[in-house]
Image: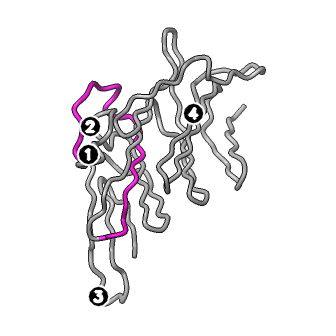
Amino acid sequence: YIYVASGQKVVILDAFPVEDMTVLSEIEFGNAVTEIFVNGDKLVVFGNGLVDSPRGSDVSSGEIIDSRYISGYDPAVLTYDISNRDAPVLESSVVLEGSYVDSRMIGDYVYVVSRKTVRVGVEPPIYYIDGVEHKVVAEDVYYPTFRDNSYQFTSISAIDIGSGEFNTETYLLGTSYTMYVSENSIYLTQAK
């Protein structure tokens, strides 16, 4: 199989034998797909504004839920069951308040880094997991002991694509644009 993220869609091709290559399915979105990961029978799709609502999609029906907006361009992480590549099924949706930085997949876990600008009166990020709101409370934010500038809420989220379990930690850090990852660590860097 070949999995292609092109513009506002993901295409799954049956690529063997080459002379019989055919399109098995297409998943279309409202905005461009940033990247994808494939792990066995799971497809993980990333992008800003992939869903029309911060509450994401109704996993049972695949339809967008009508709700109040945080921003129509918030990053989303959508996990599909592709055991039947002719008909992918949306299993879970996570909408992150703020902006997408980067992601990596290690084994069955997808790690997503997002950030939200800190301004006077701004609260820590909100997440919508399968349509349910989850707020990060200030007491759970890690505050470093060193001085930094251009503070932002930086969140590192882990999604177990097997079980769908979602965990996140939020840190008050400067602007981190480059990420390095080993099997056991995530490094966020910034220019000084």
- Residue at image location 34% in from the left, 28% down from the top: 71
- Residue at image location 36% in from the left, 52% down from the top: 91
Q: CA distance from mark 3 to mark 4?
A: 44 Å
189 up-or-down from 39: above or below: above
* Mark 2 neighbour class, 10 Å CA radius: few under 14, some 14 to 19, many 20 or more: many
Relative to residue 56, is residue 158 drawn left or right? right
- Label for residue 20? 3
- Label for residue 155? 4
- Residue at image location 49% in from the left, 9% down from the top: 121
* Residue 84 is a magenta residue: yes
Q: Which residues are magenta?
A: 63-85
**Location of residue 179 in the rendering, given as x and y in whole percent from the top left corner:** 64, 45
**Which quadrant is the C terminus positioned in?**
top right
Q: CA distance from mark 2 to mark 4?
A: 22 Å
Q: Are marks 2 and 1 in contact (CB under 8 Å)?
A: yes
Q: CA distance from mark 2 to mark 1?
A: 8 Å
Which mark sits nearer the N-terminus, 4 or 1?
1
Amino acid type at circle 1 is Gly
Q: Are marks 2 and 4 in contact (CB under 8 Å)?
A: no
Q: Quarter-wise, where is residue 93 in the image? A: top left
According to the picture, the residue beneath numbered tag 2 turns out to be: 52
Amino acid type at circle 3 is Asp
- Label for residue 30? 1
Of badges 4 and 1, nearer the viewer stands 4
Q: CA distance from mark 2 to mark 3?
A: 36 Å
Q: Residue furthest right?
A: 146
Q: Residue furthest top?
A: 120
Which mark sits nearer the N-terminus, 3 or 4?
3
